[in-house]
Image (cartoon, grey):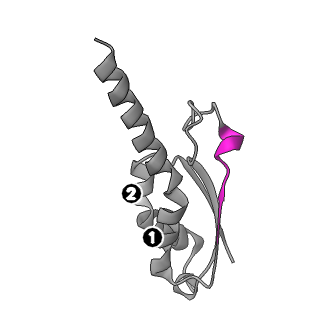
């Protein structure tokens, strides 16, 4: 009786791929709350394949963002990072493992 289980596994894999393929867009949408005039999102997951946070090379687990926003001006680095991490909390809860933040 492997048939139904294989179909469920295939559906699950496609659901995971669909979910992970859109992480850049979700990050972009969430950071739009800061009205950035510069935003670059770099997926560095391939460089961490097999490491903690990406043991099965599922991708979209390690990112660098470069952002410039007046909303972050006048705040300490800790405050800036907290604002960004709070906006991306759902991503961290759903597989985002590491985020490097460059604020200019």
Q: Return the x and y of residue 38 as percentages of the image width and height.
A: 65, 80
Secondary structure at badge 1 equals helix
Q: Return the x and y of residue 53 as percentages of the image width and height.
A: 54, 38
Quadrant of residue 103 in the image? Answer: bottom right
The label number, if any, that marks residue 30 in the structure image: 1
- Screen quadrant of the C terminus: bottom right
In the image, residue 19 sits, relative to residue 33, either above or below, namely above
Q: Nearer the viewer, residue 55 or 73?
A: 55
Magenta stretch: includes residue 67: no
Q: Residue at x 49, y 78 (%)?
A: 32
> What are the residue bounds of the magenta stretch?
40-48
Dot 1 and dot 2 residues touching (CB under 8 Å): yes
Q: Return the x and y of residue 20 as percentages of the image width and height.
A: 49, 49
* Nearer-N-terminus badge (1/2): 1
Quadrant of residue 47 in the image? Answer: top right
- 49 relative position to 60: left or right: right
Disc 1 to disc 2, how far (Cα)?
10 Å
The label number, if any, that marks residue 90 in the structure image: 2
Badge 2 crowding class, 10 Å Cα cut-off, few under 14, some 14 to 19, many 20 or more, is: some
Q: Residue at x 48, y 44 (%)?
A: 17
């Amino acid at each position: 009786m492997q048939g139904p289980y294989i179909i469920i596994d295939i559906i699950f894999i496609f659901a995971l791929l669909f979910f992970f393929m859109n992480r850049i867009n979700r990050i972009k949408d969430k950071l739009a709350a800061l009205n950035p005039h510069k935003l670059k999102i770099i997926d560095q997951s391939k460089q961490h394949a097999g490491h903690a946070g990406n043991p099965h090379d599922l991708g979209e687990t390690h990112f660098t963002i470069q952002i410039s926003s007046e909303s972050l001006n006048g705040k300490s680095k800790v405050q800036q990072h907290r604002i960004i991490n709070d906006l991306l909390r759902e991503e961290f809860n759903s597989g985002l493992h590491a985020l490097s933040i460059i604020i200019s």
